[in-house]
Amino acid sequence: MCIVDDTCFNSGSCGVGSPFVGYQTAQSLEECRESCDQNSNCGYFSYDPNNALCLMYAECENFSPSNCPECSSGSSDCELQKCFKTGFCYGDQVNIGFFEDVNECVRFCHETEGCEYWSYDPSANGLCMLTSNCPSKVKTSLTIHH
């Protein structure tokens, strides 16, 4: 089971004064986390999906959701790769919603009885589909096994 909590994955960004160690382009939150994990100076990352940009920091000071509301941030040792897989699950639908960021979709799954997988597509107005299984998927977005 993947746990999303305030110490692992947050909406927002590290603030001014955070020791910056570099940046690079990234196509996903997981790619950004992996880049940070591979950089010995990086302890925290902020991923900006609108600009496909991964910002890496030694420490995350003055964190705030208002610094970059569309960004997602976390620690380099966060085990997101065990949770996120590429693809959109098509299974027995439990619920559906529309959210501004993937973090809200993850929480929606955790709060919904019977949810075992979620799929989030920001390009479809933030579509978040919850399913109880995942017999087939199309490689387009992020999916989680809960």
Image: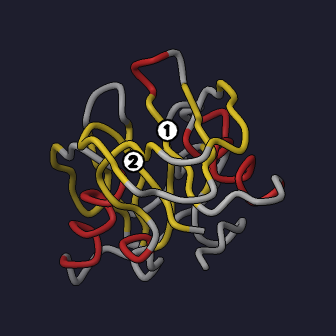
Q: In screen coordinates, is 142 left or right of 61?
A: left
Label ID, residue 36: none
Q: Residue at x 63, y 41 (%)?
A: 93
Which percent across, then down, holds residue 69? 59, 32
Question: Could you tell me the amino acid type at mark 2?
Answer: Leu
Residue lying at 43% horizontally and 82% vertically, measured from the top left:
77
Do the residues under discs 1 and 2 have CB atoms within 8 angstroms? yes
Tell how many labels: 2
Foreground: 86 or 42?
A: 86
Name the spot of residue 106 as percent of width and height, x first. Answer: 64, 52
Distance in Å between CA atoms under marks 1 and 2: 6 Å
Residue named by callout 1: 120
Vertical placement of residue 79 versus 36, above or below: below
Taking the spot 54% from the left edge, 59% from the top edge, the residue there is 133
Residue positioned most to the top: 125
- Residue 106 or residue 17, whichever sits in front: 106
Q: Is the N terminus in the top left, top right, bottom left or bottom right quadrant?
A: bottom right
Residue name at image x 33 percent, y 65 percent:
33
Quadrant including the C terminus: bottom right
Q: Amino acid at mark 1?
A: Tyr
Q: Which residue position is annotated with label 2? A: 142
Give residue 17's position: percent from left, percent from top.
50, 54
Image quadrant assignment for residue 43 = bottom left
Q: Residues within 10 Å of mark 1 (few under 14, many from 20)?
A: many
Local SS, label 1: strand
Residue 140: image quadrant is top left
29 or 96, which lies in front? 96
